[in-house]
Amino acid sequence: MARYELVKRSVALITLTNPPVNALSSAVRHGIAKTMERALSDPKVTAVVICGENGRFCGGADIREFAGPLRGPPLVPLLDLIEAGEKPVVAAIEGVALGGGLELALVCHYRIAHFKARLGLPEVTLGILPAAGGTQRLPRLIGIPAALELITTGRHVSAQEALKLGIVDQVTEQNACEVAVEFALRAIAKPLSSRRLSSLTTPCPPNLDALLEAVTMQIQKKARGVMAPLACVQAVRAAATMPYSQGIKRESELMATLFHSGQARALQYCFFAERTAGKWTLPSGAQWNDTKPREIRSAAVIGLGTMGRGIAVSLARVGIPVIAVESDKKLLETGRQMVIGMLERDAKRRGVSASLNLLKFTLSLEDLKDVDLVIEAVFEDMALKKSVFRELSKVCRPATLLCTNTSGLDVDALAGVTDRPQLVIGMHFFSPAHVMKLLEVVCGPRSSSETVATAMSLGKRMGKVSVAVGNCPGFVGNRMLKPYSDQASFLLEEGATPEQIDKALEDFGFAMGVFRMSDLAGLDVGWRVRKESGLTGPDVDPKNPPRWRQGRKYCPIPDMVCEQGRFGQKTGRGWYVYDKPGGTNAKPDPLIQNLLETYRSRYGIKPRNITDQEIIERCLFALANEGFRILEDGIAARPEDIDVIYLFGYGFPRHRGGPMFYASMVGLQRVLERLEHYHQAHPDVPHLEPSPLLKKLVACGSPPVQKWREHIKTMHSHL
Ligand SMILES: CC(C)(COP(=O)(O)OP(=O)(O)OC[C@H]1O[C@@H](n2cnc3c(N)ncnc32)[C@H](O)[C@@H]1OP(=O)(O)O)[C@@H](O)C(=O)NCCC(=O)NCCSC(=O)/C=C/CCCCCCCCCCCCC(=O)O
């Protein structure tokens, strides 16, 4: 796990060999300990270079080991030993030096980085802190403000920024290993004491307390309830106020508070879930690693509304020529200006030039005859979409992939009007499409494996986290949203207020509660969908009981809010009132309070006191309950896929792991009991009846989330 060679007759070259990222597993730590001992004790060796195999220095501690008992040599004494050695040690950083990888580099006396390398201490994103001396050595090297920023955010820096900050000594465009060996030979005669970071005094700003206080407040505002960044601040404070020997103890105490925490487990689960989500499998057996995607050299986007614009920008900025189509001249011109503006701003932010030459705008679908792939992003109306797909089927060459950006309509019905149903697939982007990372790739029953592979690979190329899902109304994300927001509406009926529900959800960790989020998205969107599905509006039979639709209890309060022209932020009024249309400062509105009181008295509902616990349980357990049904129906292949969709598309707090992981952390038995309790208390409220899969998992002893698949794999898959 660490190779040893003698190069240039006197330099010991130690190569970490644990592909793909040379993580510091127990075996690698053993390897480092053994090879370092050999290098330090061999009189022929005058200097040491440490590098990583396959052009990657080291991706840090082996995160998979955190779940089990800790074995092998502990990192801190091993790293202290390297730093204390009397022979110069040079880190040759290629690829990445992250977490424990950077901490390893920090105990080397010199650091040479390849110009493409990235460095950072991302432990905070895994719910822990850089506990191999990183919180003590980095501040000593680059000062408190810069170290605090890197450690509390986990941000990666480029080699060039690392050089400016003083993290590395040299950046090279050549082979970093060879440069490091030459560097090591020159370092032999130089004294090492000033290169041992643990022996340095941390350069301290005069306003240390104020700085730490400001950063703490910033963290509390941005990452409410998240523990790791706050522990990082305390560890950095120790670097500023204590000698290394005490600081490292404080670092380890703080690590002990985080290491086994639910937040650390959730965040580490998210890390792996995100990577698992890209590994799709179809019922045919075709999967991500045996199906070659087609190369997409050109694309088209139909419709330049909010979604279409964002999609066009997402394609063009990764170098794909895009033809954008609108139905009339005025809309085309507005869309053109918007797309160009967005692309220019995006390029400016990234410090690159805007690829405007890749864009073409047209009114004619005929211009799409030669493109490799089309993404339809017209109004969410089945008849309109069908007419577009019929037309595309006529004008595009037979091999063109036809994708729809519907947020919930039947992808197979669209495939059915084309001459190539196997090349039709859903690509459900989230708004704003050039910003949001999530892409639901909706596989119809007739989508070919090559089509799935191509859509998934295009998503990755656009920097999206792509998840393959099956075809059903609302797919995964929007299907689950309904039980969640329905519970919130029923809670309003029963006595809660929008601000109380939002506060409970925001205290749980959501950036915005369900009502603030609806105000942001626009209440008219859901109203239109409800009208189209006959839940409200003129199509409802007047003899229908007012709070009953399609055989279920129905809460009409959201419709009543819309009937008053309150469409959310854009109209200055929705569930809240705003200082102006488009304003963002949400204030509770007495008119909504009146509306709720009038409604309750009209239907003889006696408002009751609703606790935050009930809000969280009813909204989130109903959400997860629908997730279990989605797994049963084979619409999502694994709970990880659902969680990734909720993390990246719906702002589910990452430190809670996603709705399915959260349910497993609460305990499936408890979730089942609470759903049964609420279902008994409110038998007519939909979505509270526990799903068969939840009951089955509890009956099987509540296996961990990674094992649920074993209990559902025999079920029918729509994927
Ligand atoms: C940028 C990357 C490195 C590479 O990205 P990319 O090229 O896109 O590749 P990926 O798809 O992401 O990854 C490829 C596969 O590699 C797996 N992987 C990646 N990194 C790791 C890792 N660090 N460990 C394990 N596995 C890893 C990944 O899952 C992929 O696998 P697969 O192909 O899907 O199967 C990118 O991967 C990346 O960003 N990686 C993570 C970098 C990171 O976050 N590093 C920090 C890790 S944590 C760390 O280093 C901590 C250091 C402190 C050490 C503390 C020691 C423990 C002390 C314990 C104290 C306990 C107190 C207890 C108290 C008590 O019990 O009493």
Image (tube, rainbow, N blue to C red):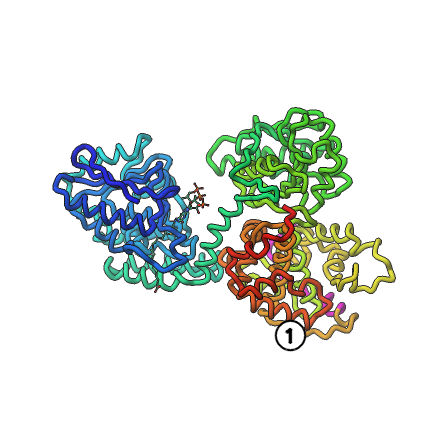
Residue 514, quarter of the rendered image: bottom right
Q: Name the spot of residue 37 as percent of width and height, x first.
A: 19, 48
What are the residue bounds of the magenta stretch?
A: 580-599
Residue wearing tag 1? 609
Q: Which residue lies most toward the left here?
A: 43
Queried whether the magenta region covers residue 513, the answer comes back as: no
In this rendering, would 691 be left or right of 391?
left
Q: How many marks?
A: 1
Q: Give the side of residue 535 with respect to residue 362, left or right.
A: right
Determine if the C-beta at disc 1 is less than 8 A from ligand 1.
Answer: no
Q: Please tell me whether residue 705 is drawn above or below residue 495 in the rendered image.
A: above
Residue drawn 57% across and 62% down? 697
**SS at badge 1:** loop
**Residue 444 pos. (x, y %):** 67, 42
Q: For the N terminus, which image quadrant?
A: top left
Nearest the eye: 68 or 58 = 68
Residue most extreme to the front:
714
